[in-house]
Each structure stands twice: as C-alpha cells, then as structure tokens.
Amino acid sequence: MILSIFLGVLVLLFAIGIPAAFSLGLTSLIVTVYERGIDGIPYTILAQRMVYGVNSFPLLAIPFFILAGKIMNTGGITDRIYDFAHRLTGHLRGGLGQVNIAASIIFSGMSGSAVADAVGVGQIEIRAMRQANYPDDFSVGVTAASATIGPVIPPSIPLIIYAVVANVSATALLIAGILPGLLMGALLMALVAYQARRRNLPVEKWQGLAALYRSFLRALPPLMTPAIIIGGMMTGVFTPTEAAAVAAVYALVIAMLVYREISFAGLVRVLRETMRETAIIMIIVAAAALYGWLLVFTQLPQQLVGLVDGLGLDPVMLLLAINIFLLVMGLFMETNAAITIFTPMLLPLAVAAGVDPVHFGIIMVLNLMIGLLTPPVGMVLFAVAKVADVPINRAIVAIAPYYVPLIVSLLLVTYFPSITMVLPNLLLR
C-alpha cells in the first residue's frame, strides 16, 4: 500500500501538470498523513529534512556550472566552439550533422547542462543547417540527441546531485562519465553518416590544416576549460565544487576581458537568470530530499530489496528491469527530481546485485538523458522545438531514429562496467 502511495500519487500529480517540487511535497505530506494521521504531522521535522537536503557543499557546484554555461552562451564562446567543430568535422559524411555532435561534445565539457547545449549551441547549429538546406527533421533530431551528451561528460549537474544523494565521490563520477559520453557521440555520428548517405546530404570540402589551426587558436581559451576542470580534479588541486567555481570565473574572464562580448549589464542579466534557475533546482532538491527521507523512514528500499530477492532475478534481468523503470519514469519526471527520488530506492537493489555505485550513477543519468527527449516532460525536446520553431509532434517524429544509438549506448554501459569504471580505477588509485 505504501509503495502505491509513494509512486502512484507522485505519477498522478506529474501527469496532471503539477510542478515537480509541489508534486514531491504533496506526496510526502500525504504519506505522512497516512502514517501518522492528520494531527500527527511533524512539521518541524519535515522542514528540517528539506533544509538538510540542500545543506550540502557539493551542491554549490550547481549555480557555478549554470553560470559558466550561461556566460558561454552569451559571451561569444559558443560561436568559436562551433567554428572549430566545423573546421574539424565538417568534411565528414553528414557534414553539419557531424559538426553538431562534435560541438555538443566540446560544449558538454563546459556547461554540464543538456538544456544549455540545446539552447546555446543549438541555435547556431540549426541556423547553419538551414542555410545549407538540410531538412528540418534531420537538424532537429541530431541537435536534440547530441544535447543529451552534456550532462554525461564532466562537468555534470545531475552527477553532482547523484553524488550527494548516494554519498559517493563526485570526482569519480565525473571522470566515469567521459567514456560513456564519447561512446554516445560516436554512435550518434555513425547514425548521422548512415542517414547522410541514404539522404544524399551535402558534404563540405576540407578547408585544410591552416584553417583548422586558425579556428583552434580562436577557440583555444574556451577549449582549455575541460582540461582545467578535469585536470584539477584528477591532480587534487581542487574539488568538483571548487572546479565549478574555477570554470565560472574562467568563463567570465574569457567573455569579459579576452573577447569583451559581455557588458556589465549583460553580466547582471546572466546572474539573475542563474539565480532563478538555481532556485528552481534547489527547491526540487529540498522537496525530493524530504521524499527520499520518508522512503528510508518507512523502510521501503529494504522491502524492495527483499521483494526482488524473492523473485530470484539475476543481475542481468534486474538491471534490465531498472533501466525500463527509469526510462518510463523519465517520461514524466524532471531529471534532478528523479535522481533524488529514485536513488535511495534503486541503489540498494543495484548494490545487492554487485553494481558499483559509481557505475549505477552513470546508468541512471543515461536513462534520464533519454527522458529529456520524450514527452510530456522532455525539456530538451521542447527547447529544440522552440529554437527551431517547429511543432512538438514534428520534433518527436524527428528525434525518433536517435533513440536507437542512445539505447545502444545505455545497454553497452549497463552490461560492460569497464566502459564506466576504467578511468576512475586508473586515475584515482
């Protein structure tokens, strides 16, 4: 009964359009009333659990990563990244489709947000592909799919939230996402090459090493961001939280002092947008922290572990069941809310099956990235449809073929743990 309340009420509230934070809070309140009665609601404890949920040092990385992404989108940095990706991969089969994916891989090492990628680089990509007479459905599909790489390759806001909830090393998680993110990019590029051949899409001429070198020099300052972030964490110079602050300051220096494309008024606007988005995420995290605490308080995770043990599922089938569950939940739930809700519920099942918590974090984020492309709550789906000014139903059809490489990436990462764990094991001994 308690499981049906925890999940049934929450899914119902999401389905009727109640915002994530309020859905989580109302579900938690209903569970409390069910357990203790209307007169026994411990308001003080509930408030304390919400405050405790956001009282975490690693969560400070979130506003800094958001700020860094917004500065790059408004400070001329994305244009230089796109130009470099264009010179690097524009001559490959698929032309601007390959450029699209390469730019997303590069930008993902700076922003940590799929929506920031879709809105920032996506505007440049779709405009360039339309000017080159690429079909809109192709442009929309590849732009949306490539944006999901952003939160997998470090930095990553969802991985930071998972690290806090699961109490695992944020550094290990961020480094573990590098190879899965590159795998996603490689499989997407293979699909683009196939579609380009089938549709006879244009292929650009190779501009030569001189043009590539000039473009590299123009983009060198922002291209140094991933090296600074990953190198600093690997060498222990700073923590992931401090890395986020370094990335934000570095982006600010590039945009205001090197490229001089952000004014003081523009910086104030960026800071306001960052504060607004941070507040939204933190409210969700606070409400989800209360929800997760109630899960543990009612011993639901232990009950689920016992139930699954009784079913006798082997690790292969258990991971398949978890993937299907997360894919379905991704249809209805915002990524950060889903991580804070389902990590306390599903992580004990995965650990009992012998899955490393770091590996499981990558599996969870990959699932939820696919959810960003699915209605009714797919934020990247809606963002790209808005940027491209196409109807949602047309965007859904355009994205459909790209589920294949993303699902293949998910299965490979799920059942071949070395893809995820080789870098953390090698670099963080």
Image (tube, rainbow, N blue to C red):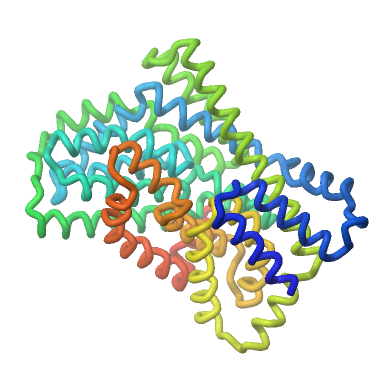
* Image spot of residue 322 (x, y percent): 54, 71
Choose between 253 and 12: the one closer to the eye. 12
* Image spot of residue 412 (x, y percent): 40, 69
Say which residue appears at 66% left-offset and 40% top-offset: 282
Q: Residue 387, located in which quarter of the rendered image?
A: top left
Choose between 374 and 358: the one closer to the eye. 374
Q: Is residue 73 left or right of residue 188?
A: right
Residue 237 can be seen, yes or no: no
* Image spot of residue 307 (x, y percent): 68, 82
Q: Is residue 162 left or right of residue 252?
A: right
Is residue 246 placed above or below 409 in the rendered structure?
A: above
Choose between 316 and 234: the one closer to the eye. 316
Q: Quadrant of the C terminus?
A: bottom right
* Image spot of residue 339 (x, y percent): 60, 55
Residue 296 can be seen, yes or no: yes
Q: Is residue 47 left or right of residue 58?
A: right
Is residue 365 placed above or below 222 in the rendered structure?
A: below
Is residue 115 placed above or below 216 in the rendered structure?
A: below
Say which residue appears at 28% left-offset and 26% top-offset: 217
Say which residue appears at 49% left-offset and 11% top-offset: 265
Q: Residue 192, located in which quarter of the rendered image?
A: bottom left
